[in-house]
Amino acid sequence: MASTANITVRFFAQLKDLAGTGETQLLCQQAMRVAEVKEQIAVEYPWLRPYLKSVFIARNGSYCSGETEVNAGDEIAFIPPVSGG
Amino acid sequence: MASTANITVRFFAQLKDLAGTGETQLLCQQAMRVAEVKEQIAVEYPWLRPYLKSVFIARNGSYCSGETEVNAGDEIAFIPPVSGG
Amino acid sequence: MEHRSYQSPENDLTIELTESDIDHEALTASVRDSACGAVVLFLGTVREFTQGRQTDSLAYEAYHEMAIRELQRLVAEARKSWPLKRVGIVHRLGHLELGETAIAIAVSSPHRAEAFAGTQFLMDEIKKTVPIWKQEHWSDGTTEWVHPGFPKQ
Amino acid sequence: MEHRSYQSPENDLTIELTESDIDHEALTASVRDSACGAVVLFLGTVREFTQGRQTDSLAYEAYHEMAIRELQRLVAEARKSWPLKRVGIVHRLGHLELGETAIAIAVSSPHRAEAFAGTQFLMDEIKKTVPIWKQEHWSDGTTEWVHPGFPKQ
């Protein structure tokens, strides 16, 4: 079950360029929340920290709050300010 | 000069149907105003009278007031409430 | 005396009255401009039901030369409020079936709010002042000119 | 996992993300309906100048599966306010030249005020919440992702 004990984190646009990757894996901890995922990413990619306060988070394709619980297998997307249209 | 001493009056849509014609001629009188053209038409076509208070008048293709002076050769159009678009 | 179309010398306004199908694709293409971020196209289409009554078809009639002049005036008025880059207006005349396009207005502008506002203004004003009239051909076989405010026949 | 297009079972909503030219004529045709008197088409096009800086071209990137889901949500929200009969939304991705269409939204509604309001709402909300990003390729050779509110690089 080790392979599903991960969560996938996705980066887009400038965030992807800054992170140097569009996707990374985190080990899912028990009763983990979105805010903790964000903090782990800030620790792992400290140069992203100034940007992260302007980033929304989506869990499995829907916007969510920092309090949202994260489960193994979830996809957590870091959504920088959008500019479509 | 008799042929240019006339003004042309035009009717549209339901007004044309009611008048039985799209166009008629009036003899242009000295210092004639649009309101007098309207009144002459009401005398000549008395069954149009109930409609004429909802009709705008255009002189040579531009909306005008009852006070506008009419000259020989002018085209006076009776514009019933519009419904284009 | 009849002018069924108008094109401005600056090539930023075309107006057309036509008895043929409206080619709104060509109209849209004609207003595109790389100075603009927004194009709005409005189509007025023949609706089947109006306040519960069923329409079979429509007929439109215009005072052509004045309609074109009045449309020019409305566009000039709109441009006092919004920076409309290019404007195209086509009104269909004659007989129209259900679903067909009675009017098409295309507008381009640098920003979208202006394109929306300008198009909506033009459409609202056209319905008030441009000498074009619609005749309903109801499904019950009767016909009726639409003259808001006229005494009922 | 990637869904690049969506069509509602009721056939009243189509959403598409595409790297090809947007066929807004087909999109407009797809929303026409004889129950409707109004069609509004909005095109967002690549503008040459933004606050004095010159654009050479653009690139768009999306979080595809979420963008489509978010667009569905926005259309459902719009329908709470306006009776939008059919809605079609296409967003272009990848590389775009000046003047090309980045987004097309087509809406039909019985009456025009609702079609205008609904289209404008959708466009305004898309710019706020749908996970699609634009990268400017400026004429000076630099590139820049557009993220309103991000720290300047």
Image (cartoon, coloured by chain):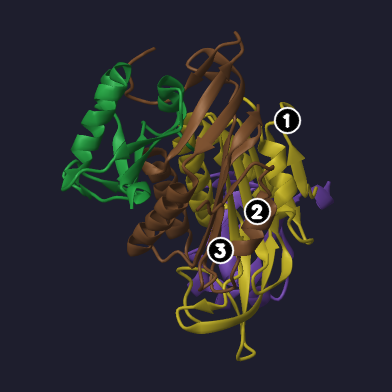
Chain colours: A purple, B green, C brown, D yellow
Q: Are marks 1 and 3 in contact (CB under 8 Å)?
A: no
Disc 1/disc 3 C-alpha distance (Å): 28 Å
Q: Chain of mark 3?
A: A
Judged left or right of residue B28, residue A42 is right
Q: Amino acid at mark 2?
A: Ile
**Secondary structure of the residue carrying numbered label 1:** loop
Residue plotted at (72% across, 49% down): D25
Residue plotted at (49% across, 39% down): C62
Q: Amino acid at mark 3?
A: Ser
How many numbered tags mark residues here?
3
Q: Chain of mark 2?
A: A
Q: Which residue is tagged 3?
A: A83
Q: Badge 1: few (under 14), some or many (20 or more) residues near its Cα, within 10 Å?
A: few
Q: Which residue is tagged 1?
A: D11
Q: Quadrant of the C terminus of chain C?
A: top left
Q: Quadrant of residue B41?
A: top left
